[in-house]
């Protein structure tokens, strides 16, 4: 069957304008062009509010939704058919009327240690400045390396690397996937294991969003969905959602397939890293979201509620 028959003459992808976001959009554009050879697949690029505000931590300016709102408006207005996101930037609660219809095969989900001077976290001297944009990473670093100075790091990937190169930081922690996708693998001094730094829900995966009412668009992109990645990410996002996951919550959630089962690990912490509650759960892949909810409940029973209450009061 020629899948092009069901696709229109023109398909428009909404994307942020950053170099990494455009790589992601072009990646999906190429895949869709291969699937629907008779369609002209275009990219509508735009700057989002999250891209414009770079002088404050994301947790203080409204969270992850700032990176996708303008793309959703473009879909509502009919200027775009779909949007491509780094899934760790997508809020756990999707806005009404929108759907994450396809999740592509995952790139390396681990965190990367990037430095021009030091080989790893253990090599950093006391007082060394480490930059990160993530409360999750900050809590891990403060818990395990209290002698380091942790400072906020905003901006797109190129901006963050430039700040490191200018000497504003001794090291920075980034998602490995973005560096790999932009051909910057040589900047990675070491990859942090999940035991050292449990990834964020959805890290390394791309999500394709459409209007929930657009069954036609959902059908065009359905072949791009990677079932194994989708099961893992659904478990991770359900875990985070059940704990009220947002940029204001230091939380990690990471699932893999092992022995035919889905293995989900998760933690929640205070930003200073002094209180951490973690756990893991295994189950059938088809029970992905239920596994996420059950692990969240398990952590609540172990004391996560106290951490959540502290952060809410905070």
Image (spheres, rainbow, N blue to C red):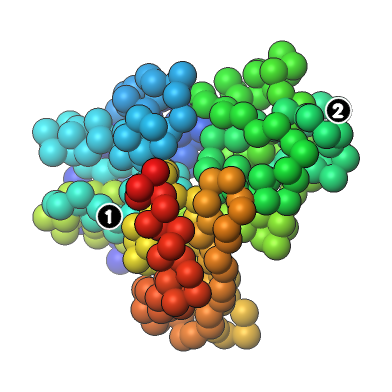
Q: Residues within 10 Å of mark 1 (few under 14, many from 20)?
A: some
Residue 53 picture quarter:
top left
| Residue 166 image point, x, y percent | 72, 14
Q: Residues within 10 Å of mark 2 (few under 14, many from 20)?
A: few
| Residue 89 image point, x, y percent | 41, 43
Residue 257 picture quarter:
bottom right
Residue 261 appears anywhere in the view: yes
Residue labelled with disc 1: 93
Q: Secondary structure at mark 2?
A: loop
Mark pair 1, 2: CA separation? 40 Å
| Residue 243 image point, x, y percent | 38, 62
198 up-or-down from 189: above or below:
below
| Residue at the image position 49 percent from the left and 85 percent from the top | 283
| Residue at the image position 69 percent from the left and 18 percent from the top | 168
Residue labelled with disc 2: 117
| Residue at the image position 24 percent from the left and 59 percent from the top | 219
**275 or 72: nearer the eye?**
275
The quadrant of the image that shows the C terminus is top left
Q: Secondary structure at mark 1?
A: loop
């Amino acid at each position: 069957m020629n899948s092009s028959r069901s696709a229109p003459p023109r398909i428009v992808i909404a994307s942020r304008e950053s170099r990494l976001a455009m790589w992601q959009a072009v990646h999906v554009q190429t895949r869709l062009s291969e699937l629907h050879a008779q369609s002209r697949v275009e990219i509508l690029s735009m700057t989002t509010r999250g891209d414009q505000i770079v002088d404050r931590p994301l947790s203080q300016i409204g969270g992850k939704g700032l990176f996708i709102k303008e793309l959703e408006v473009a879909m509502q207005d009919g200027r775009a058919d779909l949007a491509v996101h780094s899934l760790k930037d997508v809020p756990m609660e999707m806005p009404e009327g929108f759907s994450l219809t396809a999740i592509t095969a995952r790139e390396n989900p681990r965190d990367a240690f990037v430095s021009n001077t030091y080989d790893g976290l253990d090599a950093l001297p006391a007082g060394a400045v480490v930059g990160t944009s993530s409360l999750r990473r900050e809590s891990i670093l403060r818990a395990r390396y209290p002698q380091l100075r942790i400072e906020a790091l905003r901006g797109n990937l190129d901006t963050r690397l430039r700040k490191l190169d200018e000497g504003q930081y001794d090291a920075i922690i980034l998602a490995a996937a973005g560096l790999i996708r932009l051909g910057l693998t040589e900047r990675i001094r070491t990859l942090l294991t999940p035991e050292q730094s449990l990834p964020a829900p959805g890290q390394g995966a791309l999500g394709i969003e459409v209007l929930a009412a657009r069954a036609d668009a959902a059908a065009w992109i359905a072949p791009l969905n990677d079932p194994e990645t989708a099961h893992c990410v659904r478990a991770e996002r359900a875990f985070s959602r059940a704990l009220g996951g947002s940029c204001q919550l230091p939380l990690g959630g990471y699932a893999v397939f092992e022995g035919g089962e889905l293995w989900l690990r998760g933690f929640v912490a205070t930003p200073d890293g002094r209180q951490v509650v973690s756990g893991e759960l295994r189950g059938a892949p088809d029970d992905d979201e239920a596994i996420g909810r059950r692990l969240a409940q398990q952590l609540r029973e172990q004391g996560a509620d106290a951490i959540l209450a502290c952060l809410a009061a905070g």
